[in-house]
Image (cartoon, helix red, strand yellow):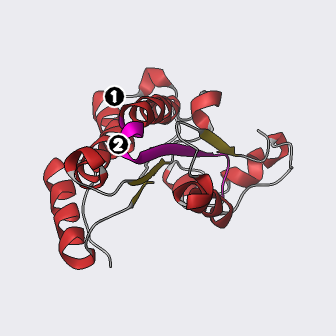
Amino acid sequence: MAVAGDVGSESDVERLFAEVDRALGPITALVNNAGILERQMRVEHMDAGRLGRVLATNVIGSFLCSREAIRRMSTRHGGQGGAIVNVPSAAARLGSPNEYVDYAAAKGALDSFTIGLAKEVAAEGIRVNAVRPGVIYTEIHASGGEPERVERVKAAVPMQRGGQAEEVARAILWLLSEEASYTTAALLDVSGGR
């Protein structure tokens, strides 16, 4: 089932969750994977519009979606518990100088959000973790103006290659599963050692 919407829009997020409630019933898992970046540039050239767009999708969207999931999953609200996995980025540790400092800062906010939210809802049956991808072969690099970015930077990765989306997905699936039942507030790097 696909539902179109903007995670940075509170009304869209509320509508999305209402449609999921109707079509699928109670939710047990949420993956906050929506993310954008803009053209590579230095901070001195960024304007407030760009910053607002990056923060709306990368940070506010994760807060809004998590809020709706908690209202449904938390034992405090009559739910059966569940798991949330945020998808920040290794960029939060690296800073992305001369390219995407705003994106890296937004992803750093997700690191803090993951830890704080995990502790806030742990006793309510909800586990919250994060998977921080490194350089992965996805279309996001084209929106930054460099479709072949992974090829350029892969030599800086200890494993000497870019990652695949499926490798990130496997880590997310593990954190959502019962195999990770005692794992919360964890930040798992899937970055080839970078």
Front label number (2 vs 1): 2
Q: Earlier in the sequence, mark 2 or mark 1?
A: 1
Residue 28's spot in the image, x, y percent? 38, 62
- Disc 2 is placed on an element classified as helix
Q: Please provide percent x and percent y for residue 167.
A: 68, 62
Horizontal side, residue 19 vs residue 182: left or right: left
Q: Which residue is mark 1?
A: 47
Task: Identify the residue at image location x=43%, y=26%.
Answer: 45
Spot occupied by residue 152 in the image (x, y as percentages of width and height): 75, 48
In depth, the one of 53 and 69 nearer the eye is 69
Question: What's the magenta region?
Answer: 121-136
Residue 20 in which image quadrant = bottom left
Q: Looking at the image, which is closer to me, 182 or 31?
A: 182
* Quadrant position of residue 94: top right
Q: Is residue 6 left or right of residue 100?
A: left
Residue type of the residue flagged with mark 2: Glu
What's the amino acid at mark 1?
A: Asp
Query: Does residue 37 show up?
Result: no
Residue at coordinates 17% horizontally, 48% vertically from top-left?
Answer: 10
Pointer 1 local density, CA inside 10 Å: few below 14, some 14–19, many at least 20: few
Q: What is the CA distance from the residue labelled 2 to the residue labelled 1?
A: 40 Å
Q: Quadrant of the N terminus?
A: bottom left
Q: Is residue 135 magenta?
A: yes
Which is nearer the eye, 125 or 163?
A: 125
Which residue appears farthest toward the top when viewing the image? Answer: 44
**Residue at 60 percent of width and 36 percent of height:** 91
Q: Where is mark 2, residue-wise?
A: 124
Q: Up-down: is 172 above or below 116?
A: below
Spot occupied by residue 38 in the image (x, y as percentages of width and height): 44, 44
